Amino acid sequence: MRFGSATNRRRLLGFATILSLGCTPAPGGTPASPTSIWARSHNRSPVDVYLLCGDHDARRLGIIQGSGTETFDIPAAQGFCVEGLNFFLVVQESGRGYWVGPFQPERSAHVDLVVEKYAGLSSAYVTREPR
């Protein structure tokens, strides 16, 4: 493909525009307040919980004790990610890590994180809260 022709330049410009829009938050898509994460674990070991935008920008949220529950918050500034947010769970007993996601919280929503006995089967659900 030659970039010299007008058609190819328009295609390249269109492609570059689409890629750049992927880095901008959608209007109204960013939560205005922190998003609550309600986590419960069926795993017998403590589990470290990290939040990532796609597969980068890891932020440690905290620990869920074995067979315990915990509440975390996603700051409003980190509540939107074009690639989708992911949890990365590290089971302390085995040192193994597991991905959960992607998910995209909305305004007036919270996230339910369920850590299973086998952490690889864990799940995250976005639940809208009644207004």
Image (spheres, grey):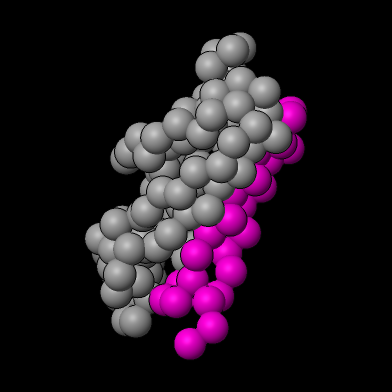
Task: Judge whether 27 appears above or below 16 on screen.
Answer: below
| Horizontal side, residue 32 vs residue 86: left or right | left
Residue that appears at 46% across and 49% down: 71
Query: Is residue 27 visible to the viewer in this orientation of the structure?
Result: yes
Q: On the picture, is 53 further left or further right than 65?
A: left
Q: Is residue 108 magenta?
A: yes
Question: Can you name the residue that lies furthest to the front here?
Answer: 68
Task: Give how far across and how far down residue 89 sits, in percent.
Answer: 53, 32
Q: Residue at x 29, y 74 (%)?
A: 32
For residue 129, above or below residue 112: below
Counting the numbered discs, the total is: 0
Span shown in magenta: 106-131
Q: From the viewer's perspective, tell me whether residue 87 is left or right of residue 52.
A: right
Quadrant into which the N terminus falls: bottom left
At 56% from the left and 42% from the top, the residue drawn is 69
Image: 122 above or below 18: above
Give 90 or 6, whichever is nearer the viewer. 90
Magenta stretch encompasses residue 58: no
Q: Where residue 15 sits in the image (x, y, percent)? A: 38, 66
Provide residue 20's location: percent of width, then percent of height: 29, 64
Q: Is residue 22 left or right of residue 47?
A: left
Task: State the residue in front, 15 or 50.
Answer: 50
Q: Is residue 54 visible?
A: no
Front-most of 34 and 9? Answer: 34
Residue 29: percent from left, percent from top:
38, 75
